Structures are given as structure tokens and as C-alpha cells.
Amino acid sequence: MPKSKITSPSLVAKQSLWLFGSALLVLAPLMPHLPQWLVALTTLTLLWRGILLWRHLPLPSRWLLVFTGIAGAAGIGLHFHNLFGRDPGVALLVLLFSLKLLEMRTRRDGFAVVLLGFFLSLTQFFYAQSIVNAALTMAGVTFTTAALVVLNHWRQAPARTLRLAGLMLLQAIPFMLLLFVLFPRVQGPLWGLPIDAYGGLTGLSDSMTPGSISQLSQSEAIAFRVKFAGKYENKAPPQTTLYWRGPVLSQFDGRSWRIGRVFVSSRLPYQASGEAIDYVVTLEPHFKPWLFALEFPVSIPAEGLMASDYEILAKTPVRARLRYEMRSYPGIVTGADESPAILREALQLPPLSNPRARALAVRWRADFGVDDGAIVRSMIEFYRRQSFVYTLSPPLLGEHSVDEFLFDTRRGFCEHYSAGFVFMMRAAGIPARVVTGYQGGEVNPVDGTLVVRQSDAHAWAEVWLKGRGWMRVDPTAVIAPTRIELNLAQALPAGEARPLMALPGFVWLLQMRYRWDALANVWNQWVLGYNPQRQRDLLASLGMRSPDWQQMTVVLTVISGALLLGFTAWALYQRQRLVPAQAAWNRLSRMLARHGLARKPWEGPFDYAGRIAATLPPEKAALAIEAARIAEIYADLRYGENTPALAAELLQEMKMRISRIRRLEPLLPAGVSRV
Amino acid sequence: MSLTATLQERFFRWALRGHAPEPSPVILTQRRVYVLPTRQGLAYAVSLLVMLVGAINYNLSLGYALVFLLTGLGLTAILHTFRNLVQLRIAPGRCEPVFAGELASFGIVLTNRRDETRPAIRLRLPGQTSIEIEVPEQSSLEARLTLPAPHRGWLALPRITLETNYPLGLIRAWSYAAPDQHCLVYPAPAETAPPVPAMPGEDGGAARVAAGMEDFAGLRRHQPADPPRHVAWKAAARQNAGPLLTKLFTGAAAHTLWFDWDMLPTSQDVEARLSVLTRWICDAHGAGLAWGLSLPGSELVPAGDDDHFHACLKLLALYAQE
């Protein structure tokens, strides 16, 4: 039996070229996520391979590649301090893949490149899963499939190969959809993920230093989307109420603000009052526990718990897109009887830091006595009177950052203003804390969702006043009221660098972005957000009573079996498809077969007609003439050159004459059957 | 016969639906085309599994989609590979007789009645290396399969394995066919044989002198077996690049020879005698002589043309065979 396949046949130039091309397509989307030196190494390797292909030069020695491979792996280890995480894994795969291209001699090597290519296509989803990524992957997969076809049969025109690959992938799409919807989903992770699994994501963090939020505001990435219900359906409440509460920072070490100790419970720490706002949040995964909600939420989603500083914390970090329904009451009074421990924490300050600010606060305290409200007002006045500038690129601050900001530079972003405010309050003995989150958002007119981006990240302050509880103070609103009332772009002074979309004169771009965002929202909700929960909901709405994995498997098997049967029918279908003239010609033979005048397989049309004429008695001459004419037309249709119109006419005549024979058929004597 | 060999033989008999050789044309219907993943196909499946685990672990929705798309690709590969082979028609083609010890070359006519070409179909005879062909749309072509022909007589075309991995190489579709075809194998000409009997002057009763042996009768294309002294060298010198020509003489032979079974010593066995006779006939034909052949129970009257040559060899090939 076939044991002769021990050595794999070597690759021809055309196969190498296809593999090379598909490798380029697969590697390109990964480049932005690799260390720069590796990008350079990969580019060099690819260039080298390209030149070898172009010049038909032999491949380099294996030792050189082994050396490069080991050096590259060592480089990756040094770069990431680790070889087994997600990013070093991807980097190693890329290294291996590009070196394999230089060591690709046999068809088996080619197949390995194809499999690696499919693998690398998957890894780019670690970094992004947008529609664009999907399209890029589709292109890569199509070319890799074509390369696989070429690997098996290279004597074929490139266009044909691509068409075949495209056709096969098109036929694969029904299976993909079916499996996507019905394959029993498991919520990952299956085991502990490497630490870097969520690296490179932007979003709020559990600490704030000067500059951390202004950095975020350069990012157009979407933080979450909100769909309001009821009164605010397809629009949003006024911008000034849109404070999306996130991590509350109550610990200060002189430079950075951190979250303090919080207690969580499933009970609400306040009473609902005032006007209710209902909405659904679709939160992008940010791998932190915060579930953002309008101040102040009264419903706690199943995935979360209420923290003692009124933020909602998810039980596990948000690793997948999460959808939760919320209800908030903007007018709630919070913390009227706050616990002393929390208030103590809200007064904590590192000793000796920022002496000038402390001195000012102490003076105010002396001026106003016990009137905390007056001190708050003085601080706001301070911001208003002095010439503070709201800017995305504030100067760097030194050791006494609050002092330098309040008295020297006076240029800052929301984190500077809120931090300065809270510091002053604490220095004056008023419990205060920094609240970070998002402010505002933008209603997409296409689908009526409010889109909150990373650039909407914001920091404000909360002070606790005796008898009134926690009060929100947003010092940024004093400096740049438009930031709160409109959005960031309007708030920035002219000449300040701002995101492209925010530039005036780019309205059409903005319109396109709205459309695109609406599409991306559908994509997120239904493609990326299709998790076990969504799957159960969808299948239940489709009429499956209790969609468990057994049921899904049965349905999946039945439908894919039906699909396969359909495709098999397609595979076998062509059998019946004859040229119409041939079908008619066969019909004549079948008709006459009953009288022993079936056409012999080797008989040409004229021979057959001649035999019919010779067999039939002279009184049936009409029939013989008819048959002769049919044979003539058939030969003309099959072997002559006719315009389509003429061919159609001839075919018509042929069919007409055959039906005439059918009428003449009784004329055939039974006796001719055995001549 | 070992157990596996027995089982294999039973499988082949079952696969061919009991009756080999089959009447022509053999159509590879869907019931006799088998499909299994290749080693590469298994590697592909394992890779997909690993990718699926990755997609689950990292919650990559598009990862799922990619894995499922590639799964679908694997499934369509089954259909495409199956389709590349199914409904192919196989009929016996030409098969020239050969001498024992040479390679018999069987012509197999493959007909594709589909509107699409069928690339990369491999044909293999048991124990032989395979050949790869492409059958274009709506057409036929003749593939040639070679098989050593060690013994004289009829050599039956063994079971042909037709297989294809096209288009992705992940799946192998294969089928067996045994069209009714036989190759006639002449006995091998003896390497050392007594000289052709009954040279001029010798009168063993086996050779009769024919008349008109010296008359030039015309030219024909040179064949490798023609004796060099019959080549029309003058004609060759006159033309630049034309084929060599051989001079023919009337009566086609200087002598008419008789090759008689009984002329050979009885000490030789049957096959050796047949070999010697074959050798004599080849030599006589090559020298442009006429000869007659007499075997126990049959006799062919003298002649010198190609038909006679083949008729004699056929007689020898099938001597004492059913």
C-alpha cells in the first residue's frame, strides 16, 4: 500500500510565492502590536525571502536560521521578561512563522506555514475584534486557503485558484453561522490567564496622577454605550447630569490618588428620591471591576455589588462586553450619616506636602470658622478669580504638585482641578475625595445610543458637609463650563491639539463616524457580545424551551446534516446537466428505443439517421426524413458555429420535429424491433 | 495469507461490488467513492481544536467565528474532494502487446461529463507508483498505466485505485475500478538462440527458397529493427533532415523459412522453446524475410508482413494456455 510518501515533494516557485503572499497578509495586522525590533526583524526576514523568491536564489542554511531563531527568542524573553504570556507567545509565533518562510522547502513545510498562518490570524483578535479586523482576517484566510489549494495543485491560473478559495469559504459561511449561533458556548477563561492577557487597554485605573486622565482623553476608544428608555428614549438627559461614576479615590500620598478601603454589599446605602432614569449600559471590557452608572444608581446588576463609596463593583473583572440594565436617581442625597471611618479617610493627607496650599486652607479656616460651605465657595472663587487655563497638555509638576499647580503653573486638566480642590478641602478639615468616571457622552443620531468614549474620562470632587452629606463639586465646570455643558472639543481653547473628529469642518467625517458607530454597536451587541447568556436568550426566543447543550448539539447536528446533504446534492447535481441539444437528441433515442431503434453509443448522428432510414420500410419514409433532419440540426448545434439566436431557433425546430415524431410514432411497425 | 491481507482482499471485493472485472464504462457512483481525512487533515483538525480552546479561554468572539469558518472550510473540502472524483467514467483504452519482461502499458480512458475540470486525480495499480492527471471539462483523455509483464499470455488489468486530495489536501477521496482489459504478452525472445535455421543451401526440409528476392520494390520509413544493410543510405545522403528509409524487396524475403516446434530439442522446456521461436520470428521479421510457423496443433502459412508477425507471436503467447 502507499508507503512511498516518506519524503514530501519540494515546493515549486509558484507555491512559495503564494505562501509568501498569504504570510504578508496574515502578518500585516499584527505589526502594530509587536515590539519594534521584532517588527524590524520580521520585515527584514520577509524582504530577504522576497528577494530570494524574486531572484530564484537558494534558501539560507539551516544553521543561520536556528541561530536567528534562538537570538530572536532570547530577545523576546528579555523584552517581555517572560516567554509564556500572551504577548511573548504571539511574538514567538511571528518569529517562528517568518523564519519558517525561509526554511520552506517541501510541501509539508508549506502546509505548516498554512496552519501557522491560520493560527496567527486568530491571534490578532487578542488586540482588536472590530469589523475592520474581521475583514482583514477574511482577506488573510482567503489567500491562505488559496495558498493551500496551490500547494496541492499549482498548475492552475491564480484567478481560478482565488475563485475556488472564495467559493469554498462562501460555502463554509453557512456552517460558520450555524456553529456560531448553536455551538454551546462556554464562558472563559478555562484556566488562569497570563498576567498580560489584558495589556494595552485604555481606561480608568485605580489610581490618578497628574496627566493620567489627559492621556486618556486623547483616545477615541469607546468606553461604553447607553440606551436610555422612557422619557429619554433615543436621546439623553441633560449633559450636566451625565456623571458616570467610576472609581472613587480617597487616598493621597502627595502625588497620586488611590482608591481607599471600601466595603461591598448588595444593599443600597441610600433612599431613592426624585426623578428616575432607566437605561441599559453595554460596557466594553476594561478588565477592571467598575460598572459605570449615572449618579446615583438604585439597581445593582446581578454581576455586581454596591461599594460603600457608591460605585458598583463587578464580582470579577469585566473581561467580556457586559450588558446591564440600570436605574438611577440624579437627585439622591447620599452619606447624610456617613461612618466616621470613611470620613477619617476622606481627611487624610500626607504630612509636610504642599505647604503653600496648606497655609491658604488654614487661613480660610481661620477666616470662616465652622462654615464649611464658605470654604468650598472660597475655593471655587479661587479657581474663578485666578487665571486658570484648561488644557490637555499641562506642564510637568514637581514634588509639591498641588502647590505648583495652584500658585505657579495654573494650567491643568480635570485631574489637576479636582485634586487641587480635594487637597484644599482636606487641608481645611473638610472631608473630600476625588471621583473619577466619565462625564457626558454623545448621542449617535443613527441609532439613538449615547456613546461614551475614553476621551470623556473625567475627575471631579465630592465634599461632605454636615447635615447635607456628600456634595458633588466639579471644579472643571468653573474653569471650562463648556466642558460639562457641551463636550471636550468645545471646551479646549483654540490652537489646542484635539482629536481629529473634534476639528471644525469635519462634519461629514463626524456623520460617517455616527454611521460607523451604529454599525459597530450592532456588531458588538450581536457578534462580539454573543455570550452564553445571549445564546440562551436568543434560542429561547426562537422557541427552544430549555436550550441546554444537549439540545443545541442535537439541533446543530440536524441542521448541519441537512446542509451537508444539500451541498452533496449540489456536488452530484451536474450529472443531469446536458447541453439542451444533447438532451433532446437523447430523448429521440429513448423514444425510438421502444422500437429497437435506440442509438448505439458509438453511432454519430448521421450514421444513426442512416440506420433509421435503412431499417424503416419505404412507406415510413416521412419518419426517416424527419429523423434525418433532426440529426442534421443536432450535428449543426453540436459541432457547427452558430450565433446564440440562431442556435436557439435551431433547437426550437429540433424539439418541434421530435414532438412530431412522437405523433408519428404509432406508424412504426412492431416488426422492425428486431432487425 | 495473513489476516490483514484476507480482510483487505474482502474489502476490495466488497468495494468493487462483487464483480471484477466490471463492464465498461465504469462510473464512479457516489456509493463507491470513499472519503477520509489525510494526515494533513488530522493536523488541521487538531489545530482547529487548539484554536477553539484559545478562543474560549480568551473570550474571543471573532476567534470562535474564525474557528467555525475554518471548520466549514474543512467540511466543504470533503464535498469538493468527493466531487472531484464522483461520476468520473472509466473505460479501457488501447493496450499494445508487449514481450514478457517488458512493461505493459494499459490505456485508461477517463471521461468527465461535468462543466468543470477535474484536476489532480491520481491513478495507481497495486504496487506501482501513481500518475497524476487532469481531466478537462466535457472531455475524455487516455491515461497510461504501466505494469511489469513477467509472463507470456493475457495480463489482466488489476484493480485501479483512483484517488484525489484536491483541492485542499485535507481529505482523500478514493475509489476502485477494475475495467475489463487485458494486455497480450508475447514470450520473451531468447537471448541466446541457435541461428535461424535453414540458411541458403541448407536443406533440412524446413526452408524453401522463394523467388524474386533481389527485386527492389520501394521504400518505407526506417524502423529500428530493420537491418542496417537495407537502409537507403543514398536516399538519406540526398536529403537533409528527412527520416531514414528502408529498402523493400519483392517477395519481402530472400528466403521463406519454417519455424517448427519439433526442430527444437526436446530437452528444452516449453517456455525456452517458445522463447527461441520468438527470437527467430523477430529476427526473420527484422531481416525482412517471410516465415511460417508450426506448433503442435496449429500452423501459420508463410508470410512476412506485420499482421503475420503479430499473429505468430500471439499464437506463441497463448500456446497451451486457456
Image (cartoon, rainbow, N blue to C red):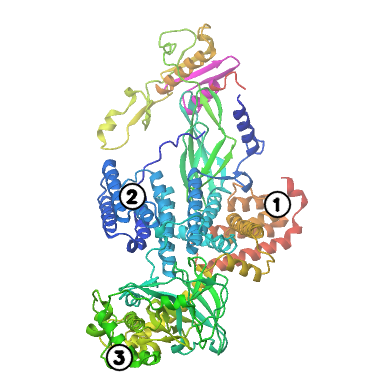
Q: State which mark lies toward you, 3 or 1.
A: 3
Q: Chain of mark 3?
A: A
Q: State which mark lies toward you, 3 or 2.
A: 3
Type of amino acid at the residue the image marks with label 2: Leu
Marks 3/1: CA–CA distance:
110 Å
Q: Element at badge 2?
A: helix
What residue did someone put label 1 on? A593
Q: Quadrant of residue A563?
A: bottom right
Examine the rendered structure and indicate whether residue B35 appears above or below residue A387.
Answer: above
Discs 3 and 2 lie in a common subunit: yes
What residue did someone put label 2 on? A101
Towards the viewer: A191 or A507: A191
Q: Is residue A75 left or right of residue A371?
A: left
Q: State which mark lies toward you, 2 or 1.
A: 2
> Residue B132: where, in percent of width, then height?
46, 42
Q: Is residue A159 visible?
A: no
User: Magenta part of the protein: which range?
Assistant: B288-316
Q: Chain of mark 1?
A: A
What residue did someone put label 3 on? A382
Q: Label 2: few (<14), some or many (≥20) within 10 Å?
A: many
Which residue is painted at 47% across and 7% down in the image? B204
Marks 2/1: CA–CA distance:
63 Å
